[in-house]
Image (cartoon, rainbow, N blue to C red):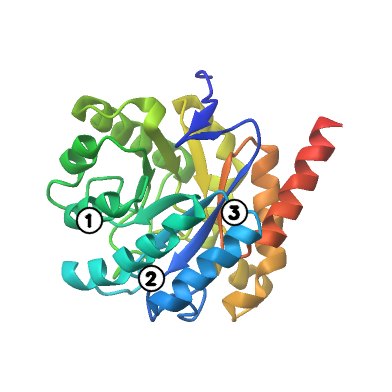
Amino acid sequence: MAQQPTSYARLSLDQMRIMGVINVTPDSFSDAGEAFTQADAVARGKAMVKAGVDILDIGGESTRPGAQEISISEELDRVIPVIEGLLETGVVLSVDTRHAEVMVGAIQAGAHIINDVTALSGAPKSLETAANLGCPVILMHMQGVPSTMQNAPMYEDAPREVSDYLEKRIKACEAAGIARSKIAIDPGIGFGKTVDHNLQIIKQIERLHEHGCAIVLGVSRKRFIGSITDTKNPQDRLPGSLAAAVYARTKGVQIFRVHDVRESKQALLICDYIQSA
């Protein structure tokens, strides 16, 4: 196993870290547009800070299954005021985008991390731009594109193929000038994957440690939980979200992308205490 990172984006990884989701979109599958207006998004972010969040991940373009693209200007109009409104909290801010222009605007506005669902491969100049900005990045695996990714995802060995893809993207980033220490990886649960693919990837999540990068995992309110438990409303999937996150924590995952900060932090903290007892 590669040497494991001790920190990421100014945060020590000697404890688990919580990344709170701020979707400034009207059609997010998980939160029904709860934070669509800038004022609501800022208020939601500040509430997450009070609940103990470590990172706030701000996105202005929906990447739910079947989602359609929006213009660059609209995405910027959604995320920049929210980033500016949350700077005073002092928390680490991440921008969830795949577009170079939004990356530049967000980092200039005060964001610290670029979180790209296409692993800096889905838009012109995104890799070059991220390298020039010099900030930490999160590379996520996605099979296909949001509008069609859930139509018929196929793998021979999902955990292996996801891991291999992420290693290729890490090497592309290194070649562009992004140090491995600035890279976190996300297997992309629910992004071009069936229920079985998601379960296989989570069960073997520890294999991602071979890359020597921090691991980000987003299982919060995901559709696979609803499919297994027959829970149609994403907001009713907290118990399943916590179960999946705690399992992944026992496998060494460091960063958890969640909607329910207080509950997730409590569950993961108890998991840590049990493991260290």
Q: Is residue 242 above or below residue 228?
A: above
Amino acid under label 3? Val
Other-residue count near label 1 (Cα within 10 Å), few / some / many at <14 / 14–19 / ≥20: some
Which mark's residue is nearer the viewer, 2 or 1? Answer: 1
Kindly identify the residue that appears in the image at 50 percent across and 19 percent down.
2
Residue 252, percent from left and from top = 63, 35
The image quadrant of residue 181 is top left
Q: What residue is pinned by disc 3?
A: 53
Other-residue count near label 2 (Cα within 10 Å), few / some / many at <14 / 14–19 / ≥20: some
Amino acid under label 2? Pro
Q: Nearer the viewer, residue 221 or 207?
A: 221
Other-residue count near label 3 (Cα within 10 Å), few / some / many at <14 / 14–19 / ≥20: many
Residue 28, percent from left and from top = 43, 75
Say the numbered circle drawn on residue 37.
Answer: none
The image quadrant of residue 250 is top right
State which tag comes first along the sequence, 2 or 1: 2
Say the numbered circle drawn on residue 65.
Answer: 2
Q: How many marks?
A: 3
User: What kind of element bears circle 2?
Assistant: loop
Q: Is residue 81 above or below residue 129?
A: below
Residue 267, percent from left and from top = 75, 53
Q: Is residue 31 above or below residue 150?
A: below
User: What kind of element bears circle 3?
Assistant: loop
Say the numbered circle drawn on residue 105.
Answer: 1
Q: CA distance from mark 3 to mark 2?
A: 27 Å
